[in-house]
Image (cartoon, rainbow, N blue to C red):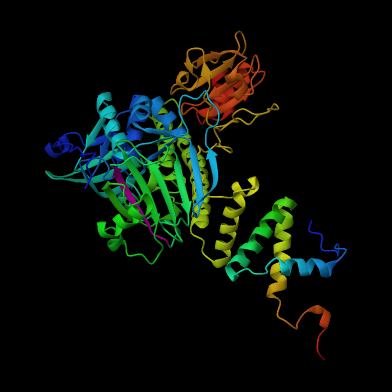
Amino acid sequence: MLDTAPKLADPDAVFVTLVRAHHDLSPEESRRLDAALVLLLANHIGDGAVLEQAIEQARRAVRAPTGATEDQGTPP
Amino acid sequence: MPTTYTNPRFPFRRPLELDGKGGSARVVIVGAGLVGLTLALDLARHGIASVVLDDDDTVSFGSRAICFAKRSLEIYDRLGLGQKLLDKGITWKVGKVFFGSALAYTFDLLPEDGHRMPAFVNLQQYYLEEWLVEACTETGLVDLRWKSRVVSVDPRADGVRLGVETPDGSYVLEAEWLAACDGARSTVREALGLPFVGQVFRDRFLIADVVLKTEVPFPTERWFWFDPPFHPGQSVLLHKQPDGVWRIDFQLGWEADPEEEKRPERVVPRIRAMLGKDVAFDLEWVSVYTFRCRRLERFRHGRIFFVGDSAHQVSPFGARGGNGGIQDADNLAWKLAAVLKGTAPETLLDSYDAERIPAADENILHSTRATDFITPKTEAARAYRDAVLLLAREHAFARRMVNSGRLSLPHAYAASPLSTPDEEAWAGGPAPGAPCLDAPLADGFLLNRLGNEPVLLRFGENASPAVPGVRTVTVPAEGIAAERYAASAGTAYLIRPDQHVAARFRTPNADHLAAALARLWGREPAEAAREAA
């Protein structure tokens, strides 16, 4: 089961680490880097079902129209 | 263009039918290619005569299917051609995958000893077809009719009526059973109007067979390059064949013009870029191909069977086309022979669909995945593909994702109606439905002892009860064979005529064995019990 509860002690640092990983890379290299990271982490997790749940969450986030998330409520 | 081989021309013989005689056959096979000839020979080994119709008068043009997998070699060994394949063919088992100019990883398809047959033998298809024609002729049971084109197919309840056209005229041939082994563009399939649908891959590949006149540093291995410096952005595959011929496959992309790419002016520079300008070579055969993965919904249509490419098509990566067709023939021959001899009920033939459709689906799945890996369809797919290849240099987990073709392995008929499921606990060994594993014995190899009739394979003396009418092969309860079959003293395997496992027992008894034998022949065990009573 995919665990999406906050777990990182220093989330800002992790965000910066991920962005910095792409420093100096061409767009093509950047894309490969992300793919390599996903592959390494998918193998670390070692569970196809968890990966599928993560993909579902990620796709939902990407496909959601901006400004229409539930948190913002419905305009009057 | 070929310099190492000249196609034989087989004579057209005026058939009896043109003089008002003959006119019927128990089995007619359409297509004297690899699969049709294999089926005819296998039927003949069971004592069944057949008529084989072919619109041409020779064996295959060009080397075509060159990689014969272990299971196919074992089938040909059963049919008496195994040694010829070993003697003439190029034996290999190691594959290397390169990304750019660096080695990404190496695999070994048969790391253990003690098998009569290697992982693969490379051989031009025409040699094997020529030997099959000879072997079929020697049996005296195969009526090979060259220059005989099927022009009409009329399926009936008790057979098929065929219209055949020859240089001397046309005739009608009534077949009790018909095997359509007439390839991807099957005339029989088209005559029946059966849909043959699936996925088309938007890519083109160039096959170049070249005779090298200079020593090259390539070992006897399968080498596959992703994005090599000599052919940037595409893949290249290299195989060694007999007669000093090398097969090189260049991925060209969908935009390539197939006619243009076949011209030596286009082909020679590609090869020179790969081998270096100092290597002298001759072009032996050139072909540009596209491919698709598809299959018929069913392979048996009443009295008609579709066998090989007429029933299913795959991409060439993994060598699953020719090998899959050979296994179809291997599966059908003993069943059809048993029904014709009255040993088994006609319902046994339904198991051809039950067993070979899942096998075709497995081949299509693997070849589709390989094709998707080799030809990424999106930028994201390419990024993942390249990342896998980069990680593979250091990480074992990524090596297992590198897919330059998952090389042909026999299908285990896991859910076969002919199998008796295990009732005891097993740790290893071939499960019911799986092909038998070879093993060395004191006086040869296990598979050579099995033949083409049902066999009771017993481990240890004085063990299992015998089965009436079934030959018993006894092997030691200790040693490599026992280990590979997870066997101990008393273990017994009931083996099918195609050398797949039908049932296995740690503590066999006569009733269980009789029921398993009935099931093997496609009879209900209850029916067998009534017969015994």
Residue B490 location, x and y as percent?
64, 14
Count the marks.
0
Residue B519 location, x and y as percent?
55, 29
Q: Pick whichever, A44 or B128, lies toward us.
A: A44
Task: Report the span colored magenta.
Answer: B203-212
- Magenta portion: prevailing SS class: strand
Q: Quadrant of residue B337?
A: top left
Residue drawn at (83%, 83%), measured in percent from left and top?
Answer: A73
Extreme-bottom residue of the structure: A76
Extreme-right residue of the structure: A9
Residue drawn at (54%, 66%), measured in percent from left and top?
Answer: B378
Residue A66 location, x and y as percent?
72, 81
Q: Pick whichever, B479 or B507, lies toward us.
A: B479
Viewer can see residue B306:
no
Residue B332 falls within the magenta-colored stretch = no
Seen in the picture, residue B260 relative to B320 is either above or below; the reply is below
**Image position of B208 (left or right of B97):** left
**Image position of B438 (left or right of B28):** right
**Image position of B219 (left or right of B403):** left
Residue B209 falls within the magenta-colored stretch = yes
